[in-house]
Amino acid sequence: MHHPVPRPQSLPPSVAPSAELASSPSPSLAAVAPFLTPSLATVVSGARRRALRDGDRQIDTAHLLHSLVESDPEVGAAFEGGHQLARVLGYLVQRSIGYGLRWQRTEEGSAVRRLLPAARGAESPGARPSPWSPAAAAALEGAFLRAAERGEPQARGVDLLVAVAADPESRAVEVLRRAGVDPAALTARVTGLLAARDEEPSQQV
């Protein structure tokens, strides 16, 4: 029987990556990969390549959003048709030549409280810089928690989409609002998609 889990560090190892992530305040891509569906692992890898190409030190939520809408059909279905998705992509591709210039060499903060014990503390002196912005790391935790609450061992792309949309200070939310997308309405559509999926035979993406 599934029981709601209020804190990710209390989840069993088979459900969420608490042990692996709690061992480091800056989990590597390899550390989180086993806890992502194959499609979401592809999304995260794509976000990392985009960050490197843009010369950014960290993966931020806008990188994650860009990779999600380009690579994950389930995420695309959460938007109000192709026109809305096209507007979001249109704003995302302008990052390197427009509004995103003010993000260069700055760190994306987060309005979401981190839950894992190690993640709440500051990195130790001399520690390797985190590959994630604080907001991106918080979004990953949120995605893992959503999956765990459904009793699933791996987070899906829509879990990460909801998590980035939940942080009002994230760069992803700024992009969504610029494109005329209401983050709350987007989250509601994801909830509806997952409810409809649960009425069908389970399929792992």
Image (tube, rainbow, N blue to C red):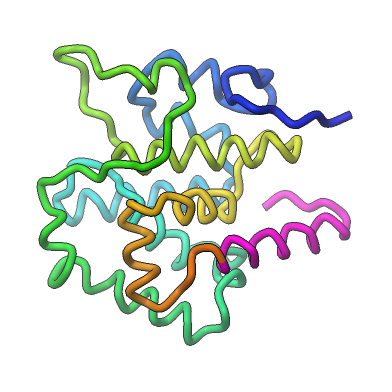
When asked about the image quadrant of residue 109, the answer is top left
Choose between 90 and 52: the one closer to the eye. Answer: 90
User: Is 170 positioned to the left or the right of 1 in the image?
Assistant: left
Residue 8 percent location from the top left of the image: 58, 25
Magenta run includes residue 34? no
The quarter of the image holding the N terminus is top right
Residue 129 percent location from the top left of the image: 21, 27
Q: Main secondary structure of the magenta part?
A: helix
Residue 72 percent location from the top left of the image: 54, 62
Magenta run includes residue 199? yes
User: Is 51 positioned to the left or the right of 199 in the image?
Assistant: left
Residue at 29% x, 40% y is 133
Q: Is residue 158 above or below residue 24?
A: below
Number of marks drawn = 0
Residue at 71% x, 64% y is 193
Residue at 16% x, 12% y is 125
Choose between 199 and 6: the one closer to the eye. Answer: 6
Q: Magenta residues, as a range?
A: 185-205
Residue 170 percent location from the top left of the image: 34, 52
Residue at 57% x, 34% y is 35
Q: Is residue 196 above or below residue 123?
A: below
Choose between 106 and 39: the one closer to the eye. Answer: 106
User: Is 191 positioned to the left or the right of 98 in the image?
Assistant: right
Choose between 61 and 31: the one closer to the eye. Answer: 61
